[in-house]
Image (cartoon, rainbow, N blue to C red):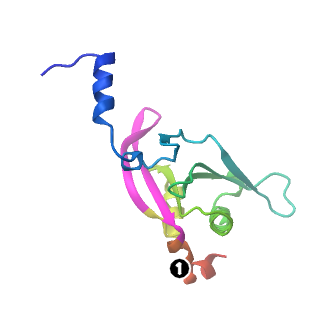
Amino acid sequence: MWIEAASAEHQRAFDEWGKCDRLEIKTCRPIIDGKRIPASHEAIVFAFLADGLEEPVGRFRYFDINPRNRSAEFGYTVNPIYRKQGMGTKMLITAINQIFSTTEINKLYCQTAAFNIASVRLLEKLCFCRDGILREHHELNGKLWDDYIYSILRSEWENRKFFNNKFT
């Protein structure tokens, strides 16, 4: 066995191997007219404001919106001067309630570094499921750290009555 750069002839063979009745079998990405469409670069951003404060207390952004799977990735940040005051909890609850009540999205997911203990605790506090670990995926100061993937489904969010009452 040996390795070499793939030629045009090799690519034709690969294309032949990949033929199937339905592209949906091979990808979870959106498909239009029988072709996989690239991920959208659209992002929706919410700014979180508080009475009497001049600058935002936080930002929530969701992106990689996949209409076929009804999923989206999100990220968030709390203004450093307002951290450890419950702002992250309030922000995420508000944003997730907004998304699930105004869109068809069924799953929200995010990725956070293992060293980001505050984010890990917040996601777990809000009953997100740790779906996976990307091992040694995030470099910081010369060290490679794991990244965690967390998600929550619409049904999980809606069925947690105790949860919605406790934090809203």
Name the spot of residue 46 as percent of width and height, x first.
72, 54
Neighbor class of circle 1 (other Cα within 10 Å; few <14, some 14-19, many 20+) is: few
Name the spot of residue 12 as percent of width and height, x first.
32, 24
Circle 1: element type: loop
- For the residue pair 133 and 32, the one nearer the viewer reads as 32
Q: Is residue 1 visible?
A: yes
Q: Is residue 142 within the magenta segment?
A: yes
Query: Horizontal placement of 13 versus 34: left or right?
Result: left
- For the residue pair 150 and 146, the one nearer the viewer reads as 150
Q: Is residue 132 above or below residue 5?
A: below
Name the spot of residue 144 as percent of width and height, x first.
39, 38
Q: Is residue 54 above or below residue 165?
A: above
Name which residue lies at 30% across and 29% down: 14
- For the residue pair 161 and 81, the one nearer the viewer reads as 161
> Which image quarter is the C terminus in?
bottom right
Name which residue lies at 55% across and 72% down: 157
Q: Is residue 10 above or below residue 159?
A: above
Q: Amino acid at mark 1?
A: Asn
The residue singled out by tag 1 in the image is 159
Q: Is residue 6 visible?
A: no
Give the mark count. 1
Name the spot of residue 40 as percent of width and height, x first.
60, 42
Q: Main secondary structure of the magenta part?
A: strand
**Residue 91's quadrant in the figure?**
bottom right
**Residue 95's quadrant in the figure?**
bottom right
> Which image quarter is the N terminus in?
top left
* Residue furthest out toward the left: 1
- For the residue pair 83 and 57, the one nearer the viewer reads as 57
**Which segment is the magenta one?**
130-154
